[in-house]
Image: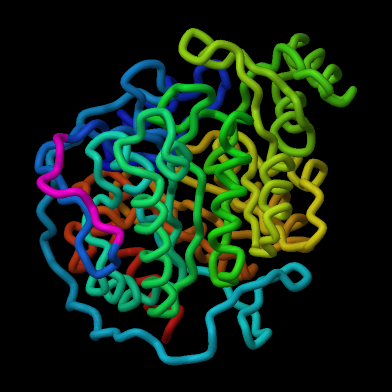
């Protein structure tokens, strides 16, 4: 999802706009351009990142993504008035950094195991901000990134935090408002801080753009111009950190394919023919997952025609850098359509792949227990499943409660959108402030469910 959250109706309207010909609803949510903060976020974990502006226009996309100032996949709604929590839950017990065996996570068969070889299930949150602050306000994090804020997360029983990233900011290209060194240092420091509290980190490529265009929103697929270079660099930095997972691309989505790059395999021409015949989904599964060389005209008025990077392309970049970290590969249609995932899973020489699934109440494909049973369980029999985003648009926890109960019974992990103080209401925002006060309904429901897992 994306930074502040609009009403359910606005989310539905956003979803329609975000599809841009893909025919699917749009799920991650982010904020729109914000006024410049009073200070730029520091790479030091114990310093508060860029201050949070008091006036900001949010955006939505299935993660619902922040809208672009030009041609973005999602429209940017105005946020509703923030609801004042009626009852603040008692603060969590004070949590201090853990002194234990090194944190590590690996795939073993169809489940994840920790450094001791014990099965582990991830339950966490998405910490949005690093994907947009660096191209909107010259900051890095939206809100604090210090020890107190991480201790608060740990106090909820969170054992994983997903951090959406911007490829241009990491690489320091296309006019990003922070340098590559500052951005990378801040992310490294934050990941180290999370680990010190026993929390796994998931690094997610969320905002990307081909060519010389600045990445200012979530495109439908990663671009070959920069995404492999991004993952090669990220993998080089974190290849010694087995407690950090890589989520190759936030929410893959259908786009038309019109041609093939020089040297592309024959499968590319087959995929292009499928796309031209109207079978965009079939073309996308090959081009976006196991193929290479596909060219799209998605947003060509802004980018010209551009070559997509497949999950196999990006996975190859990770492994070529010498990283053996767990890699998450998302489903199609905003990570909510797992129907052809097993047939198109990339080849991993290290056998360290996990499937990434997203589910919101407004998704269009797989939102019922019947679908989860028929589509996810066959995958879970072969690979770990991490639900990188869960959420709902009605301000309650009724939908996520249903999903979490199902997931708990099948050993499937999940991370809620979003640990950001964008304002409570009919949106997927967990907290009203960074001291960890849960938003009534949705946030309180998630906090309560995490508490049951520790009882």
Q: Nearer the viewer, residue 270 or 234?
A: 234
Quadrant for the N terminus in the image: top left
Marks counted in the figure total 0
Position of 50 compared to 60: left or right? Answer: left
- Viewer-proximal residue among 363 and 355: 355
At 53% from the left and 43% from the top, the residue drawn is: 250
* As drawn, 404 above or below 59: below
Q: Answer above or below: position of 417 versus 350.
A: above
Residue 360 at x, y percent in the picture: 46, 45
Asked which quadrant contains residue 189, the reply is bottom left
Q: Is residue 164 left or right of residue 227?
A: left
Reply above or below: 410 against 367.
below
Here the colouring is rainbow
| Magenta span main SS | loop
Residue at the spot 82% in from the left edge and 22% down from the top edge: 268
Left or right: residue 120 compared with residue 127? right
| Residue 121, percent from left and from top | 57, 72
Can residue 404 be spotted in the picture?
Answer: yes
* Position of residue 166 measured from the top left corner of the image (x, y, whole percent): 43, 41
Asked if residue 373 can be seen in this view, the reply is: no
- Quadrant hosting residue 15: top left
In what quadrant of the picture does the C terminus appear?
bottom left
The residue located at (73%, 52%) in the rendering is: 320
* Picture layout, residue 21 above or below residue 117: above
Residue under the image location 78 percent in, 38 percent down: 290
Q: Nearer the viewer, residue 274 or 143?
A: 143
Q: Residue furthest right?
A: 266
Does 253 lie within the magenta span? no
The magenta span reads 35-43
| x, y percent for residue 427 | 29, 44
């Amino acid at each position: 999802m994306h930074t502040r959250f609009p009403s359910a109706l606005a989310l539905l309207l956003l979803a329609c706009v975000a599809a841009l010909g893909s025919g699917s609803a749009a799920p991650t949510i982010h904020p729109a351009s914000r006024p410049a903060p009073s200070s730029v976020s520091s790479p030091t974990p114990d310093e508060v990142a860029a201050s949070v502006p008091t006036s900001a226009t949010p955006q939505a996309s299935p993660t619902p993504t922040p809208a672009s100032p030009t041609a973005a996949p999602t429209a940017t709604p105005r946020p509703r008035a923030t609801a004042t929590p009626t009852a603040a839950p008692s603060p969590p017990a004070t949590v201090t950094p853990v002194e234990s065996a090194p944190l590590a996570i690996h795939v073993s068969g169809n489940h994840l195991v920790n450094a001791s070889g014990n099965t582990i299930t991830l339950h966490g949150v998405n910490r949005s901000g690093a994907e947009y602050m660096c191209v909107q306000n010259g900051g890095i994090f939206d809100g604090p990134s210090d020890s107190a804020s991480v201790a608060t997360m740990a106090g909820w029983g969170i054992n994983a935090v997903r951090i959406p990233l911007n490829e241009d900011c990491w690489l320091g290209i296309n006019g990003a408002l922070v340098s590559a060194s500052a951005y990378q240092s801040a992310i490294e420091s934050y990941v180290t801080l999370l680990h010190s509290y026993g929390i796994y980190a998931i690094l997610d490529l969320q905002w990307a753009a081909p060519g010389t265009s600045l990445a200012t929103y979530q495109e439908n697929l990663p671009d070959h111009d920069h995404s492999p270079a991004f993952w090669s660099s990220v993998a080089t930095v974190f290849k010694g950190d087995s407690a950090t997972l890589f989520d190759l691309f936030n929410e893959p989505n259908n786009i038309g394919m019109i041609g093939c790059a020089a040297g592309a395999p024959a499968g590319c021409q087959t995929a292009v023919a499928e796309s031209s015949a109207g079978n965009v989904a079939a073309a996308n599964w090959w081009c976006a997952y196991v193929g290479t060389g596909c060219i799209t005209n998605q947003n060509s008025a802004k980018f010209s025609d551009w070559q997509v990077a497949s999950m196999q392309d990006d996975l190859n970049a990770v492994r070529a850098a010498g990283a053996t970290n767990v890699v998450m590969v998302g489903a199609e249609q905003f990570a909510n359509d797992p129907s052809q995932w097993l047939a198109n899973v990339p080849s991993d020489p290290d056998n360290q792949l996990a499937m990434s699934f997203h589910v919101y109440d407004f998704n269009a494909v797989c939102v019922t227990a019947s679908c989860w049973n028929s589509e996810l369980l066959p995958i879970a029999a072969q690979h770990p499943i991490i639900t990188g985003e869960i959420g709902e648009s009605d301000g309650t926890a009724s939908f996520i409660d249903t999903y979490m109960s199902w997931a708990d019974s099948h050993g499937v992990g999940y991370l809620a959108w979003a640990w950001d103080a964008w304002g409570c209401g009919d949106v997927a925002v967990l907290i009203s402030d960074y001291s960890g006060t849960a938003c009534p309904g949705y946030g309180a429901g998630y906090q309560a469910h995490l508490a049951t897992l520790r009882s």
